[in-house]
Amino acid sequence: MTYDVTLTELASTGTCHQRVHTTAAGIASAVGRGLQDLYDFAARAAVTPAGPPQLSFPDPAPGRELDLDLCLPISGRPEKSGDIDVVVLPEGPVAQTFHHGR
């Protein structure tokens, strides 16, 4: 699969956030579970998702363990719950790509 990567500027964004620990082989299931957790959190907190979910990981070396930062932009500022916190991502430059489908 080929991805188009663009450089862009993002505005600061309020998000619910979860860091998940996994291996390169476990990324797909870790992301699936983590995003479900974020959407469930947003529903319980009665806040509306305000954009597509975001994923970042600093060192995606195959065969190694890694941490993934999963963020879901939201419309409000609910309280932290369990391992999901609420953070504001700062504005600034990013490299961005979109994944569609499986």
Image (cartoon, rainbow, N blue to C red):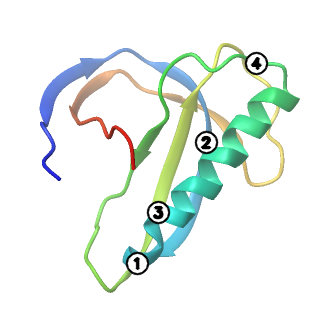
Residue extending farthest bottom: 63
- Say if mark 1 contacts mark 3, CB within 8 Å: no
Residue position marked by numbered label 3 in the rendering: 28
Q: Is residue 98 left or right of residue 34?
A: left
Residue position marked by numbered label 2 in the rendering: 17
Amino acid type of the residue tagged 3 in the rendering: Ala
Q: Secondary structure at mark 3?
A: helix
Residue position marked by numbered label 4 in the rendering: 47
Sequence-earlier tag: 1 or 4: 1
Quick one: 10 or 34, which is closer to the camera?
A: 34
Residue 79 position, x and y percent, is 82, 31
> What's the distance in space between the residues labelled 1 and 4, CA to CA?
32 Å
Q: Secondary structure at mark 1?
A: helix
Q: Residue at x 29, y 68 (%)?
A: 60
- Say if mark 1 contacts mark 4, CB within 8 Å: no
Q: Residue at x 50, y 20 (%)?
A: 51
